[in-house]
Structures are given as structure tokens and as C-alpha cells.
Image: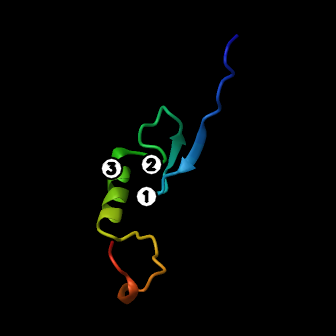
Amino acid sequence: MTQPAVKSRKVACPSCGETSEYSTANPYRPFCSERCKLVDLGDWATEKFRIPDSIPPDLYEPD
């Protein structure tokens, strides 16, 4: 029995907005290219993107 063809899904690249294929054929998914993936990683590394913390800095106690 053969597997049914899987319809590829197109998504907007989170970095540049260009349409890219979201499938295992795209090793950079959800990004369109390695460049966009690395730009996003750099934004996290330089803290341009952050996950908010609800603990005020003066109440934080390190482990």
C-alpha cells in the first residue's frame, strides 16, 4: 500500500517574511535559508529577543 502524497505547506519566514516550504525537505524550517536562521539566532544571542521575567531583579535570588 502506498502512502498518500503529503501536501507541502508554505509559511512566511519569521526573519524576512519570504514564503518558504515547511517540510522535511527544508532543513532551515521555518526559515527560508541558513542566513535567516542565523540572523534569528544572533538576535536571541544579543538579547534583542527576550522572554519576559515576572520576578523583579531586586528580588531574584540565584541558586
Distance between the Cα atoms at labels 1 and 2? 7 Å
Which residue carries the number 2 mark?
Answer: 31
Q: Of all residues shown, which one is farthest toward the front?
A: 63
Marks 1/3: CA distance? 9 Å
- The vertical placement of 37 against 21, above or below, is below
Mark 2 nearby-residue class (10 Å; few <14, some 14–19, many ≥20): many
Q: Which residue is mark 3?
A: 35
Task: Tell me which amino acid carries mark 3.
Answer: Arg
Q: Position of residue 30 (x, y in %)?
A: 49, 47
Within-10-Å neighbours for mark 1: few <14, some 14–19, many 20+: some
Residue at the bottom extreme?
Answer: 58
Q: Are marks 1 and 2 in contact (CB under 8 Å)?
A: yes
Q: Secondary structure at mark 2?
A: loop
Counting from the top left corner in percent of width and height, residue 31 is at 44, 48
Residue 15, numbered circle = 1
Q: Name the amino acid, label 1.
A: Ser
The quadrant the N terminus occupies is top right
Q: CA distance from mark 3 to mark 2?
A: 9 Å
